[in-house]
Every structure is written in structure tokens, then in C-alpha cells.
Image (tube, coloured by chain):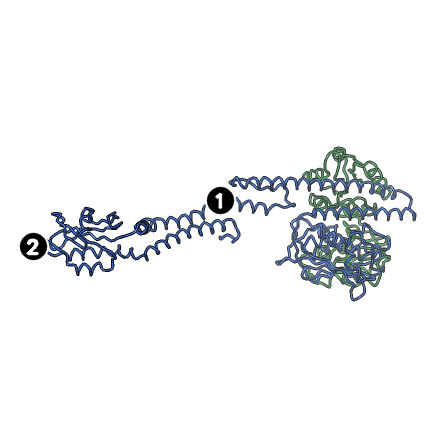
Amino acid sequence: MSSAPGSIEARLVRRLSLTLAGTVLLFAAVYLFLANDASYHAVEETGETLPRIAAAIHPTPDGKFAFNKKAVEAAIGHVAGAQYAATDNATGTPVIGSDPAIVPHLIHKLPTEQFTSKAIDVPGGLRIIHSERETVGGRVWRVALSWPMSQAQIMTIGLKHELQDELLPGVVPVLLLAIAVSWVTIRLNLRPLRRASAEAQAVSVDRPGQRMTKDGMASEITPLIDAVNRALTHLEDGIAWQKRFMANAAHELRTPLAVLRARLEGLPAGPDRDVLLRDIDRIGRAVSQLLLAARLQAHQSGETERLDLARFVRGIVADMAPLAHARQRDVALRIDHAPVVQASSTAIESAVRNLIDNALRYTPPGSAVTVRVGAPARIVVEDRGPGIPKELQERIFDPFFRGREQAGDGAGLGLAIVREVAALHGGRVGAETAPGGGARFTLELHALSGPAAAEPKRASPAPQPRPAPASISAA
Amino acid sequence: MRLLAIEDEPELGRLLTSNLGRLGLAVDLAGSLADGRSLLATCSYDLILLDLRLPDGSGLDLLRQLRAARNETPVIVVSAADAVEDRVTGLHEGADDYIVKPFAIEELAARIRVVLRRPGRALGTTLESGNVTFQTISRTVEIAGRGVVLPRRELGILEALMRADGRVVTREGLEEAVYSLEDERQSNVLESSISRLRKRLQSEGATIGIRVVRGVGYRISEAADTPETLEAEP
């Protein structure tokens, strides 16, 4: 599992790695710079040079020892300003080397260890001196080679030795380990943040009470979590209030209408009563539309579920057919395709009902409204009415638009609700005049791929007409 | 036949009682869940009209209690809430139907009839539509008072349609009602049976007809609103 390039984890790991890698590179650069320094080579080669100097010592006829200067020059020729000397390890007798004036100093400074490298301050200035015991012809010599060196060069060499011997072998693995440990640490510390973001993703209006947890969260993040949780509480309170308000509004508006209607129904039949009943039904529809529009605006359309659109629409058509017949109209369904959609059944039912209701109002008596369900997830409702002029085909979905109707029926929100429902599902609705002359409304939703769900999880509101013929036992 | 209406709005309760009474349905009225429970404890009702928002609780609680106690008295929820969730919840909890206020009394009466026409319910044995009577026990049909002998399939179709009382019965619903498992389900068999039944109803002078809802199913309708032109097959 790798983290996204913009994540905190990636950023921290990237920066830390860059810093550490930069450090390593810096060390490496210093090392390479030092390695290229001429004096470094000189120093390095004394290991070879000292035995050659020792080999150049030869006995003189007077029983002393002297250097074969030519041989020594050959050995140390490449070291600028080099001086050399030797003493007999057993007797301390010096062998005069390059410059007799330097020799006492060299001898004086000669260390006693096997191999020594040190800086000495002599009248000629700072020098570096290397010495080693060399055995030549059964005699042990302490041989010394010295050459001038500036303070900076001496420090450089020291640094180089430090790098080579201690830092590089020790520090690089530690650095690499540090990168690895940092990465793991960052990952572990970001885990609560990942969980928090998963929790935040799961928060939904449909599932109230979801909160982000603070377990294991860094103290810098907990105030954010608290703030988000507080905001969620406020939001849910608001939604709950709104739901209560809507329920109360529905009750307060509809109960008096129900009383009024029942009262009228108790009166003797007559043309006045019928007109009043129609008026009440109109108010009732307006109330329903307003309540529904308000609910949709507040996204209170409920949870979405997998809907077998053909089956669902068939239920609605079955439910509305008696009403159509009572109005001397017919309604027919054609299923060209059986799409499955993820949708709010509440909202879709309202939209389809409104489209059919609208079509029934415009189709002339004796004609039929055709409902089609097609691919990919399309519901087409067509009437045999006068059609819709081009300039109204958009505006007809505006709330309270009255262009097509002589006398309002409902609150003028029916088609606005359809558009709202379409938008809520990421779909669209359009109106046009069909080739046959009537109005054609097309509601497009997004089809889910996969097999049609046999049955939505909860009972759909209108999957089947209300009587349950399945329960009838045939003779 | 006796109905119980649990409705806390007194005026609506009174009007409901009198309006349904005029349609031949006797209704007892309870103004609260408690009243409703005490009436249910003493009397037996054929159907309950249940408001959801009551002064002493939700009608859904009573519905749940009834169903938990295996009391299968049909319940029609009568509510001002029409959010489909409310409706679905009501039906899910065991209500037989759901009607939103304000409603036409004929609509409520029709729904009551449909619910009561189910097998085993108060109107489930003698089905009446127009001048057609269907005795579900003896499986005999009378049209305008004269006995009419119908083949088995046509009887099944007529019974299913009459139980639905004007509501649409889907093709699948009719097929299930008509064919037992061993029958072959041939798509044209249903259509020809319905066609024969329709002609028979007409020739016997029935005041009801069978109306097709293309692509959906069939319903019983008053013969008057069954134009010939719309009798095409679905």
C-alpha cells in the first residue's frame, strides 16, 4: 500500500529522505574532495615509501650508516619539501638524512610506536611526520619522513580519516535505518488520521449519529475532530428540527382539509358540492407538492436503494390506471429494457407520478398516455395533447410556471419536482413535442451495471397493485 | 361488519363515522391508543382505520403489538404524513394499506373493500361488483341474479379481478391465480381466457367489464368506461 503523492505521509517521508540523503551526499562529496587532494596521495603512499627509505640506509666505511640519497630521492621524489631521517632503534644513533638542520627535530619528534602520523611545529613551519620501525639486514631502524603541510591540509586529512574510518561505515547504515524508521513511524502515526477520514467519509444524512472517534489521535488533530463532531451534531439537530417541522406542517395543513372534505361529503350531492370538493383536492395537491418540494430541497428524500426500474414504474402505472380510466383516459406501459438504478424510491415515485399526472391532464379524453422504460435508464411519458412550444420546453420545469395551464391544478410544482428529483440523482429531465404531436417528457437516470435486483431491500411503495392476488388460491 | 377508527381529531372522527355509515360501514370511534386498545379488548372488528399521530403515542406501536400478538385484523393507516418512508414503514409493520389525508370517502371505502375482499376476510366469501356476485366457497357466479357456469380458468381470473375491486391485477398476479404448477404457462392462454370471459360477461348482461392496462395487467371496470377501441391486447 503506497500513499498518494500529496499525502502527509508521502511529504514527510520525501522530505526526511531528501534531508538524510543530502547529508549522505554531502559526506560523500567531502570524502571525494579529500580523496582527490594531492597531499592525501602523499600520505597514503608513505606506507610504501618508509620501507624504501629504510632500504636506502647502508653502512659507511667508518662503521656508521648513511642514506643512499639517490635511492631515497627516487622513493620520495613526488613529495614536495620532504625531509627524512632515521635512528638505530637499539642505540638511538641517528642517520643523517636530507637536511641536517631538521634531523635533530625529526629525531626528537620520533615517536616510539610502530607507526605514527603526527603534525609537528618546527622552525620551518608546520610539518607532518610519519615514522615506522623498519628492519633492514637484521637491524631495526626508526625511519621518519616529513613534509610541510598547512594547518588546513592537516585538518582536511584528519577529517578525511574521520570520514573514512568512522563516519561512512557507521553513519550511512544509521541514516538508512533512520529513513526506514521514520517512514514506519509516520505511517503508524498517520493511521488514526486515515481512520478519521474513513469515518468522515461514512458520515451521511441518512445515517444520523455517526461521529468521528478520537482514539489514538494526535493532540493537534483532536480539536479538529471535536469541531467536526460538533458541526455534525448541529447539522443533525437542524435536520431533525426540519423533519419535525415538515411532519407538523403536513399534519396541520392536511387535517383541516380532511375535516373540510369529510364535511362536504356529508352534504347532499349537487354541483356546488362537487366544485368545492374539486377545490379542496386542488389545495390538497398543492400542499403535497409544497411539502415534497421542501423535502427535496432539504435532501430529505430518504435512503437510496437498488430499484428495478421497470418493475417499479409498472407498480406506479398499475396504481394510477384506475384514476386514468375514471378520467376517461388510458395509460399504457412499454418496457424496452429493465434497468437497475440506485435511487430514492420516494423521489422517483413522486417524479414518475407527477409526469403521468401531468400527461393525463393534457391528453384528450379517450386517448392514452404512454409510459416507456428504456435503456440505459430512461423513463419516457408521452401524451396525445397539444405538445409543448419550443420556447417553453425549458421554462416548463420552473417552479410555479403557469405557461401551459389555463387554470392551475396543484401548486405548479409538479414538473419542478421532477427536475429536482432528476438533479438529485445526477440525471436530467427534458420536454419536447413528440413526432406524433403530443408532449414527450424524458427522465434520464444512471443505470447500475449488474443484474436486476430481484427485490429492493425494503418493500417498494408501489411494486405491485395493492390487492395481493398472489395470496388467492386457485380452485 | 364492524370497523374501528382510531382518530384523535374528534370532528374528523365523527364525519368519518357518519360518511362511512352512509356507505353501509358501521364504525366505532376511539380518540386515543388507550381507547382503541380497550375497544379492541372487548369487541371484534373486521378492520381498523389507524391514525399514526395520536395523543398517547404512535399508531405504529399499536400495529406492531397487534401483529406481534398474531392479531391479523386488517389495518388501513390513515395519516397526514405522506413521505413514502412513512408509508413504507406502515406497510412494513403489517398495515394492509395506507391512505393520506385528505382523502375522498369513496377512495377510502374502495380500499376498505379491497382489503376486506381478501380470502378469509369479512367480504372475502361473497364478492360483489356491479351486478356480478361471486361465491368463493361454492365457486358459483351470478350475473343479474342468474347463475352462470364458467370454466375453471375464467373463474380464477374473475375471482382475482373481483377481489381487487377495480384495482389493477398484474399479468403475473393473474397467472399465479389461475394456473396451478402443473399447468403450462402459455402466453396466449391468459389472453384467450380473458377474451372469452369478457365476451361472456357482456353476453350475460353484466354491468362490469374487464379493462386492459397495456403492459401492466387488467382490472374490473364499470362497463360504461370500457371503450371498445381500448380493448387491445397488452
Where residue A397 appears, as percent x and y from the top left, is 77, 55
Query: Which of the pair B144/A21 is nearer the observer?
Result: A21
Where residue A154 appears, as percent x and y from the top left, is 30, 50
Where residue A285 appears, as percent x and y from the top left, is 80, 48
* Residue B190 vertical placement versus A247 (above, below): below
Where residue A145 appears, as percent x and y from the top left, is 21, 53
Query: Which of the pair A42/A472 is nearer the observer?
Result: A42
- Image mark 1: chain: A
Determine the residue positioned at 10% across, 56% down. A59
Horizontal placement of B89 versus A58: left or right? Answer: right
Q: Is residue B234 visible?
A: yes
User: What secondary structure is found at the residue carrying circle 1?
Assistant: helix
Query: Which of the pair A360/A51 is nearer the observer?
Result: A51
Work out which residue is located at the far bottom of the displayed protein and give it.
A435
Q: Chain A appears in which tint?
A: blue
The crowding category of the residue bearing disc 2, from other C-alpha atoms within 10 Å (few below 14, some 14 to 19, many at least 20), is: few
Q: Chain B appears in which tint?
A: green
